[in-house]
Amino acid sequence: MTVSADFTAKAMAHRPELLAHCYRMLGSIHDAEDLVQETMLRAWRAAGRFDPERAALRTWLYRIATNACLTALEQRARRALPVDLGGPAETVRLRPERHPELPWLEPIPDGLLGNSADDPATVVAARSGIRLAFVAALQYLPARQRAVLILRDVLAWSAAEVADLLETSPAAVNSALQRARTQLDKVAPMIDQMSESLGPAERAVIDRYVAAFGDSDMAGLSRLLLDDVVFEMPPALVWFAGRAQVLEFFADKVGRGKQAWRAIPTAANTQPAVAYYLLDETGVHRAHSIHVLGTRGSSIERITVFLGRDLFPLFGLPLTQ
């Protein structure tokens, strides 16, 4: 079967928002990439049966992607962050044990969310509802409730449109949406106050964070953190709450000297982020972690450090500096 270049181009134009959709559903950028690839393959194979008079291409692609995600979720456990799996550590552990066997939530690079001025609606669909805390909260919902809430509240589809996609009734969709909203309010009551854009204050936070970390400036870092700041670093299971504990943990890390760390500012989940490289015994700075910063005004309220090298290629970053 030959698929026209026009069909392929039009389908690929929706890729950023489909990637964001699958990421919200699955909580993993790696899984989302796989599911979008599967979606495009299914669409390509079924292109001859696509009828633009019955459904828009975008709606048709969302149907394929959503069903692929629902099938995938039947085989997967809920992805989480350390704060979802237990209370904060009572004392600081400088070398916490790692648990890579657990299904951890992953960040999504902003660079994959699209920035085409030709179709701003696609960019909005990709960037809405992508904040790390919101995606973490979504993982508490059953798969179909998750799909309903994303389609209704994030993408602003009508109940009739969602019902058609999920092959159910509008009444069932509205019922599932109400249950999903109730659950989301329990696990993340402040979620509706999140901004979906990286403003000047958040961009300034990156510079202050990098400077304090690079200069081993604990006083500067202290001024940047809120009193109730939360720090976590999957795949380590423990997490810390409060400025004193976070500073105690960081003092051991930033105190290695000004040459030990190199930083590249970036962005993930429409939040400020920093990629860090650590100097090894051979004199090479190697990829170490991605720090995603949750901000409140010009201060930091949450630091999620994703340890490991596997995310760096997705951010378009080298493994050494």
Image (spheres, rainbow, N blue to C red):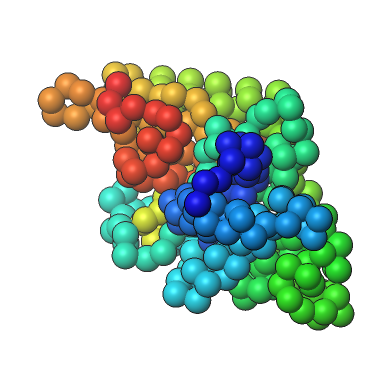
Residue 294 lies, in percent from the top left, at 61, 42
Tell me if residue 79 can be seen.
yes
Q: Residue at x 33, y 19 (%)?
A: 258
- Which residue sits at x=34%, y=43%? 310
Question: What is the tally of numbered marks visible in this picture?
Answer: 0
10 horizontally vs 26: left or right: right
Whether residue 82 sits left or right of residue 300 in the image: it is left
Residue 267, percent from left and from top:
55, 33
On the rendered image, what quadrant is the C terminus found in? Answer: top left
Q: Residue 47 occupies which quadrant of the picture?
A: bottom right
Q: Quadrant of residue 134?
A: bottom right
Q: Nearer the viewer, residue 7 or 203?
A: 7
Is 97 or 110 nearer to us in this picture? 110
* Residue at left offset 85%, top offset 68%: 159
- Residue 116 image offset from top left, x and y in percent: 68, 28
Q: Is residue 295 visible?
A: no
Name the outermost residue toward the front. 1
Q: Quadrant of residue 184?
A: bottom right
- Give 169 or 96, whichever is nearer the viewer: 169
**Viewer-side residue, 248 vs 32:** 32
Please give left or right for residue 207 compared with residue 184 in the image: left
Q: Position of residue 161 (x, y in %)?
A: 82, 64
Residue drawn at 44 percent across, 44 percent down: 305
